[in-house]
Image (spheres, helix red, strand yellow):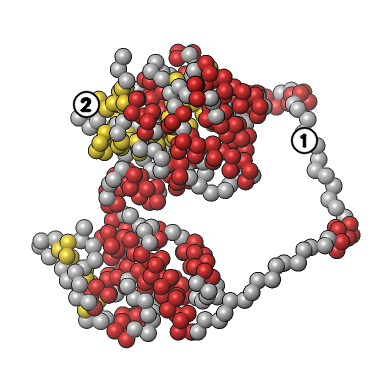
Amino acid sequence: MSDSIIIGADASGAPVRIDIEELLATRLLVQGNSGSGKSHLLRRLLEESAGLVQQVVIDPEGDFVTLAEPYGHVVIDGAAYGDAEIAALGARIRQHRASVVLALDGLEIDGQMRCAAQFLSALFDAPREQWYPVLVVVDEAQMFAPAAGGEVSEEVRRASLAAMTNLMCRGRKRGLAGVIATQRLAKLAKNVAAEASNFLMGRTFLDIDMVRAADLLGMERRQAEQIRDLERGRFLGLGPAISRRPVAVKVGPARTRTRSVIMGLMPLPEAGPRDMEALLTTDLAAEARERPAPPPPQPRAVEPDELERRITAFDAPMPPQVPELEPVEAGEAEIRVREILLAMAQEEGSTFQQAAALFQDFTVRCRIKGLPAQSLDMTQFRRRFSMALAGITDEADERRAEVLGLAANVPDDLLAPFLVIAVAAQDEAPCPDDEVLARAYGTSSSGRIRRLLDHLEKIGLIVVRTDFSGRRSISVPHLGLTTGAAVAV
């Protein structure tokens, strides 16, 4: 019996295989926006490997319960059992090597995370003699391993995240091979995603997700654009169980389908307005009486006098006395601010963060360095950070005085790429390429860089020239400076 399955075909029509035995040792991460064919890919994987390995599916939407009849999976309704029963079921599943689908569609998100945490922990805690190989597929993994807190309680979030971390980080030695699928890599906890060695990346549109997907596939950032253009059902695959080089995969057909989902358009009902009104309102009162009673009313609000009495009677503990930091001289403070800005500008991915998040990070670093949090306000920080990206650390730098004087009227969102261009022109350096300008602008789209240069040229700040060999140079007419010629890409 072969230990590999055919997941689809490449651009030439040749079959693309997944080595199941290798997959059990190296795990798999699937990403794709809604409608990219992510669930269809998981269904194909489960169908083709059903006869090779035990399967456990964490199914938050009830999409995979249709595997039960043709492939013998046992469907477990998570809403029908308590925590202790779910844990006992998880232990029995490892003991008897049953393939199951844990359907969580009857629970709210808080209950789904708590149930999945109990279930995965039971699988993980099985005794050593039951460490048989299991393919554990988790759909919508960002729900169970979120990168940040959400609507659920912190206790539930921590339990779910710990269970997912155990699955991906320590599950291999216990025979548990995680296959996790997510709509957005940015919403999935990094320590969970980082443990996968195989990747199938589908269509995604946000820059931050495209950049992370390209990094995982070993592609250059400017190549990340092709991830946006992938058609439904097409993925880029890489990993020891798939291919040593990125390969385009068109996922093959599946034998089963999700339950009660109508794909595409269908004719509307032909009933007239009166008939439709009758269908909606006939015996409405009787049906309403049969529905369960509404939840009990909320407890009565506390009267203001009682609330005031409780507040005044509360004996709050005195806060601990924290010694004040020694004041820092103005010159030393400026040096520390420059160091912080330069360090932030050199960090990978810093320009892709929101300005508010960067400013918060800056204030924290200032406190660590013994500086007051108000060393710079938000407007001053944005301009100083743009200067640091261009290599200018001192506002009083006489050599850059002309450049900074011209930049005083440049909008904040255009300042960083303009300063990069102006500094290159002043230093008679080669023209910055699209990748350098994209990093300063906080994007991975070469199209946005072309539009940026067009805008700067239209408002008269720069003049772009491209010679017959395709080399670009940029002039700053107000300063009488021009960069050297260099290839744009």
Which residue is found at the position 27% from the left and 71% from the top? 421
Dot 1 amino acid type: Pro
* Residue at the left extreme of this rendering: 468
Given residues 484 and 389, the one toward you in this image is 389
Q: Please state if 132 lies on the left or on the right of 442 as rendered.
A: right
Q: Is residue 211 visible?
A: yes
Quadrant in which the C terminus appears: bottom left
Q: Is residue 385 above or below residue 124?
A: below
Write down the quadrant of residue 40 in the picture: top left
2 or 1: tag closer to the N-terminus: 2
Mark drawn on residue 145? none
Which residue is found at the position 17% from the left and 65% from the top? 486
Residue 176: image location, x then y, percent:
45, 29
Q: Please state if 271 lies on the left or on the right of 31 as rendered.
A: right
Residue 173: image location, x then y, percent:
44, 31
Dot 2 surroundings within 10 Å: few (below 14), some, or many (20 or more)?
few
Residue 205: image location, x then y, percent:
38, 46
Q: In this view, does 157 lie above or below 7?
A: below
Mark drawn on residue 14? 2
Q: Is residue 223 above or below residue 429?
A: above
Which-is-in-front pick, marks 2 and 1?
2
Badge 1 marks a residue whose secondary structure is loop
User: Which residue is denoted by mark 1 in the rendering?
Assistant: 295
Given residues 482 and 264, the one toward you in this image is 482
Quadrant in which the N terminus appears: top left
Which residue is found at the position 76% from the left and 23% from the top? 290
Badge 2 marks a residue whose secondary structure is loop
